Amino acid sequence: MNEESKPLVICAPEPRTLDLIFTPDRLSQLRHRYKLLETTEDAVATLDDATLAEARYVLGQPPIPAETLAKMENLRAVLNVESNLLDNMPYDEVFRRGIHVLTTGAVFAVPVAELGLALALDLARGVVGADMDFRNGCEEWGGDGNANARLLTGAEIGIIGFGDLGKALNRLLAGFRARVRVFDPWLPPSILEDHGVEPASLETVLSSSDYVFVLAAVTSENRGFLGAEAFERMRNGAAFILLSRADVVDFDALLDAVEGGHIVAASDVFPEEPMPADHRVRRLDGFIRSAHRAGAMDVAFKQMGDMVLEDMDLMDRGLPPMRCKRAERETASRMRSRPVTTN
Amino acid sequence: MNEESKPLVICAPEPRTLDLIFTPDRLSQLRHRYKLLETTEDAVATLDDATLAEARYVLGQPPIPAETLAKMENLRAVLNVESNLLDNMPYDEVFRRGIHVLTTGAVFAVPVAELGLALALDLARGVVGADMDFRNGCEEWGGDGNANARLLTGAEIGIIGFGDLGKALNRLLAGFRARVRVFDPWLPPSILEDHGVEPASLETVLSSSDYVFVLAAVTSENRGFLGAEAFERMRNGAAFILLSRADVVDFDALLDAVEGGHIVAASDVFPEEPMPADHRVRRLDGFIRSAHRAGAMDVAFKQMGDMVLEDMDLMDRGLPPMRCKRAERETASRMRSRPVTTN
Amino acid sequence: MNEESKPLVICAPEPRTLDLIFTPDRLSQLRHRYKLLETTEDAVATLDDATLAEARYVLGQPPIPAETLAKMENLRAVLNVESNLLDNMPYDEVFRRGIHVLTTGAVFAVPVAELGLALALDLARGVVGADMDFRNGCEEWGGDGNANARLLTGAEIGIIGFGDLGKALNRLLAGFRARVRVFDPWLPPSILEDHGVEPASLETVLSSSDYVFVLAAVTSENRGFLGAEAFERMRNGAAFILLSRADVVDFDALLDAVEGGHIVAASDVFPEEPMPADHRVRRLDGFIRSAHRAGAMDVAFKQMGDMVLEDMDLMDRGLPPMRCKRAERETASRMRSRPVTTN
Amino acid sequence: MNEESKPLVICAPEPRTLDLIFTPDRLSQLRHRYKLLETTEDAVATLDDATLAEARYVLGQPPIPAETLAKMENLRAVLNVESNLLDNMPYDEVFRRGIHVLTTGAVFAVPVAELGLALALDLARGVVGADMDFRNGCEEWGGDGNANARLLTGAEIGIIGFGDLGKALNRLLAGFRARVRVFDPWLPPSILEDHGVEPASLETVLSSSDYVFVLAAVTSENRGFLGAEAFERMRNGAAFILLSRADVVDFDALLDAVEGGHIVAASDVFPEEPMPADHRVRRLDGFIRSAHRAGAMDVAFKQMGDMVLEDMDLMDRGLPPMRCKRAERETASRMRSRPVTTN
């Protein structure tokens, strides 16, 4: 294809890089199909008018002031290669013009779901503790080591938040014959039923589950909505697995509930990352710690590139994007997860 | 029911007890339907002729000499509430007479499969190490901690031995879209295909898997069949999860393969239980230890009672038992797993 | 709730009626939560300004001229209770303002998929012919009647068009262990793979399938895209099942291919409905006829009401609709299926 | 392999033939691995002593008198390539000696289950009637033709008899989200639960199902157990699909129940085959007829050969057969289905 006739893509994917999100093969495809302008976030608004007018896609989430946007008359989509939305472009006008804002957080769904299942099974069977005891020569053999052991098969499982991650986790649970209840106020009950799970209130999910998975994104409305009262509602000995963002829970109340022996817990996210060296979370029993490692796998980053290419192909053909998640006019301004600063 | 007209069950379930394998409700049912003679293993052969003649079932696996068996003219089944067969009764004559010898090892299938999956996911994501690092204040955050992380979803998985446990594990894997290959020389290929797995040679299972699960029972023929050569065949970085009996592997060769960094591994069984206090397995990195805890859960023992009651109900009605596993004339003498001495 | 404070819904659901799409209970709910203005399609544009300004939802697909739309300043959605889009409102402005245009065609997915499977199984086993022969006293018994019989289990299946209907059919096929290939140029390959089917070209779907299901909507681009050449490409004896719209095939070429004995076929849709009394399709062997009955089941119409209520509930809470299908800016003008005139 | 050292198989597979049950490739394999003595049923008892003593397998179900059996000192199995057991050999002695009697009826499970599903979907949607009306120019279009239409998805389904066929049907139903209840007095409840179905009494299955599938083999105890009272118990408009043997129902009572409009029905089996030319079943509305065609497909017969080869391979290696169904000491004499006389 003649270089000049290729559609222009402005690339400013910070904190990602093109090499992080594309395999060499996919990067070749990208370069073959598009003219790439690789720049930094802050430089986008300073590009010349002709370049802005020509750009069909923005790859990344750079600040786009209103006057810059006005010049981007051929823009079809901002593919932000993130799971979050920064408040750095006039979304109303973006939506008015039918420009798609696409996020790629779905790539983390399977990696996070697998770690979530690993943590749940570990809490159920005491894998970490059993291995530490064995190292220390104080392991208990056979049934003696299973006083608190329990199964996931046939258990009652609660999921809070049923986006891509919730759906991925539910799929992993397919073989466990579990009863899965879901609280998600953004989804109609019948969609949950179509996925084979039971719609339930937050209260029911908390009080009727052996395992509670928290997968809800942070919004302007749900900060700290899981506090002392929520943990009290939970079954004695139940497991609480936190995978989305620490801001949705009152973290101290969570640690208290574990320390008091009412529940066990595991978390991949923390109110400060890293946590202070002397924080009690570091030694708390009945708690498994993972340092925000659930999603950040290379295989996930590479899938971002695949998704971006697939949706750009659809949009090139005048079709709507189907692979990435589209920001919604109604909820764009409510999403409040802090964007990541490192991959 | 008139007590006298109830069928007689000789109970000698050592090392189990009736209270271990029956819930109070089930034990009531058992007592309601049958006349129980609770005795010890060694006393069975000393029972009086009338009692022996009357007994319909033996619950447990006591020694039954030929002359004792000859007197048990109404015996329909020995329900041994174990997974193993002791060489303590004349099996040929038992089979000739059509007396069923029933084992209940299937109750351990789901508990062991769940622990196996927990260990595999743990090896894939470094859950134990990440938690220990976090405790010690040296955790790595985000992608930095994921250098060796990998997924189970879409992986190539090998299963060696496809009995109840293999089938349970395969069911748990339903949501992982994995390619599962199975080596089991006792099963025809088409049965494996019916379960959605690929029949494969031992060599292929070893060399083409990201995760290898060893679920094979010990027989007179397969002691130590997984040795240095087998581990060499495995993919670099692959995970080896041993769940059945330590006797099927050359344990030192396994530890060498892990110590050399070629593979990672986890095991629930050991050549000596407990292992010596100073054994290198206790500190080996890339290895997760579980002290024979996979199956011995209360929920599993209670299921034994359920199975026993269901099959006794069928046999009472003149039907063949369908719930427990029947010892087979061809293979009874080949089963060589050491019976457990504790529950 | 005070009647005056309820949101206003303009109802003009022709050719549906409120009683068709709502059960009595659901209709009570609708009336309880909303103020309903029941009118006819043509009267909507004549409503007074205050009414238009107040309306939050339009239920139905009445003509909405630009000047009428301009007055509807609180309009959030047009819920058209159809599967098609009429060219009777200024869609560009509708989309610019973020008003959702929602269709409910998904309710027909399961009914159509079940009939599609019935027709495929019928073609595979000759159910209609065998019953007619039995009535006529000329039935063939046992294997003699199975010369052309074949299985769906393990077959190669092609699906053309993978919207709600394709997904429903694929779900019904879950137990058949079939290899399913899908042609759908509007979906990226990875979404098809997520559903467990193989993305394929139209040519491959046609030439490699034992059963071809045509589920594609008519667009401005695909009229008659399945003609003589397509049928020639098909395997000898393969089955062609047409469920979406007759306009996507060259119907005469289809009948020729069946008459010539190359394929067998079934169709729920016809180029004229009803077909002329003397049309050859009426007596063609190797062809099963269904008079556009696949979707029009009462249970489907009632589900429309459920979907409408669920999405209105979300929009009432400021959330985007998730249950109905949204018209897309890019494709709204391409959809060309003739709307139904009867239910 | 030296011809003389090959194991001997006596082949008398009437009414099958070797060419019916083996593909050319499989037949080559059979001949390569075994020495075949092809004879007729009646000639087996007349074979010379050396031949009888040498035979490892009998393929077919010839009469084997006690004195003949006594000479067959190396006999491991009778592979009868049928679904039934004739009373033509001393089964007690066969079982006493541990000779397996193997049946291959499982090959019919999928073909029969698919036809059963076809018949159920046809009854649900009136496929036969709609096609006949269309031929006759009196078809009803759209919803007008759907007055009695109903879905299988989400329905309540009853299965009577849960052997290979019941399990195959249940697998085909996987995508229908149906509630499946099963009556099978020969299976313990927990095995049914393992298959995801609900154990239920015959009464509950009849009275709580929208579709009742009869898959039960005829035994000495269940002749005609489904009579007028059973049909009365069924829901008004429910569908009765008979697939196993006509002898389990009171056929006249079934026809009465359909003629009276209480239920609809379909059957693949009949009390006389063929039925008299003037029998009312030939013209009964609400009834679909299939002339014992459900199982007799070439693909099923060929699978018999595969099963036989797989189990002979296991037995050659001293292992128990796992692929075919073994006759059971307790029930062999109860099986009363008439053997087929034609394939």
Image (cartoon, coloured by chain):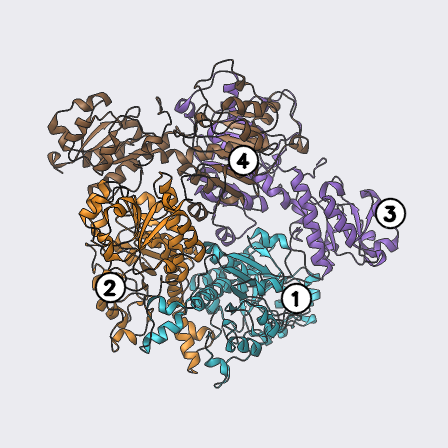
Chain colours: A purple, B brown, C cyan, D orange
Is the residue at mark 3 from the same chain as the one at mark 1?
Answer: no
Name which residue type carries label 4: Leu
Q: Is residue A194 visible to the viewer in this orientation of the structure?
A: yes
Which one is nearer the viewer's eye here, D195 or D219? D219
Q: Which residue is mark 3?
A: A46
Name which residue type carries label 3: Thr
Disc 4: CA contacts within 10 A as few (<14), some (14-19) or many (>=20): many
Q: Is residue C114 above or below residue B317?
A: below
Q: Which residue is mark 4?
A: B206
**In-image side of B76 versus C267 (left or right):** left
Where residue C244 appears, as percent x and y from the top left, is 55, 69
Q: Which mark is residue D232?
A: 2
Q: Which mark is residue D8?
A: none
Q: CA distance from mark 2 to mark 4?
A: 59 Å
Do tag 2 and tag 4 residues touch (Cβ < 8 Å)?
no
Q: Which residue is mark 1?
A: C332
Which one is nearer the viewer's eye here, C44 or C187? C187
